[in-house]
Image (tube, helix red, strand yellow):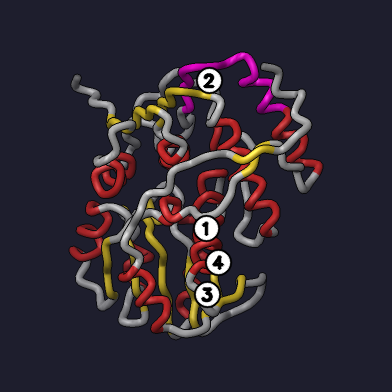
Amino acid sequence: MNWFKRSQSSMINYYPIGLDDSLLLSELLSIGFFSYMPNSGNMGDMLIAESTLRWFDKYDLRWSRLQEDQWPEVFVYGGGGAWISNWVDGLHHVMNIMQKAKKIVILPSSFDDVPDFIKILDERFVVFCREKKSFDYLLSQNTKAKILLDHDMAFRLLGNLQSNIKAPTKKLKKLSKNLLKKVNHLSGDVCLFRMDSESLGHYGTDCDLSDALGWFSSYEAREVISFAVNFMFEVLDKFQTVKTDRLHIAIAAALLGKDVVMYDNSYGKISGVYSQTLSSLTNVQLYNRKG
């Protein structure tokens, strides 16, 4: 099939995982109106953002998107994997916002070796972790923050997904076209591994799908976020088996019902989320390096 003959949109079928929302919902309802800021990043981060926005709408929460140069009193920061030593330097502005806010909620994220972040954690914070290792790490720091264990927001994706949707910018149109050229000849099994410092093995890869559309800021328009998510699912839907050490490639493929082999990353995020949320799914397995 030539993917460039994409003329008619169609629905993409996926299978949501039922999660208990009560813990997360109770905390967000208790803070009233809040300003929300997604984590910046790749397509995986846009999946977190889109899932979060749809989930907010489901429960009719009172919120607004944080705009540049705003300093909210009640601040909700999107989930992700930036709170680790590799990437935390990019969060100084976010921490400055947190230091001035009266109440802060961090949606399910990973945490590892971030002493500067630990210094600002106090009774104003409610922090959700998406795997037990992060939960144990934050608890061990003996801060005054409320630390809770939950699930990555990407698992809470709701609503419809479509293929063949129009790219909202010239940049995304060019990048998505280039990606389709790169993977057009592939079918069946695909390897979608990361090529950065989080990789444990620098495995051979067909492409690093998460990074294929570049970097997205925390202030991206909703149509940009939605396009990235729909496009990612469209690409993954072409394959039957997905091997990856990208967490949200694995989550998206799992939701699509694909056979997924997850390879751990440098600080255990993959294995942690697998144990926390994905281990009960028969179509997902965690690769054993010793096996």
Label 1 sits on residue: 39
- Kind of residue sitting beneath label 1: Asn
Direction right: furthest residue: 170
Local packing at callout 1 (Cα closer than 10 Å; few below 14, some 14-19, many 20+) is many
Task: Report, in whole angstroms, how far the alpha carbon at label 3 lies from the one at label 4.
Answer: 17 Å
Precedes in sequence: disc 3 or disc 1: 1
* Tag 4–tag 2 contact (CB < 8 Å): no
Q: Where is 131 relative to 9, above or below?
A: below
Local packing at callout 4 (Cα closer than 10 Å; few below 14, some 14-19, many 20+) is many
Compared across the picture, whether 92 is left or right of 257 comes to right
| Range shown magenta | 178-192
Label 3 sits on residue: 60
- Kind of residue sitting beneath label 4: Met
- Kind of residue sitting beneath label 3: Asp
Precedes in sequence: disc 4 or disc 2: 4
Q: Which residue does the image show at 29% across and 48% down from the upper left?
A: 277
Examine the structure image and report whether residue 182 is included in the region drawn in magenta. yes
Label 4 sits on residue: 37
Q: Quadrant of the N terminus?
A: top right
Name the spot of residue 29 as percent of width and height, x first.
42, 80
Q: Tag 4, which secondary structure?
A: strand
Question: Which label sits on residue 206?
Answer: 2
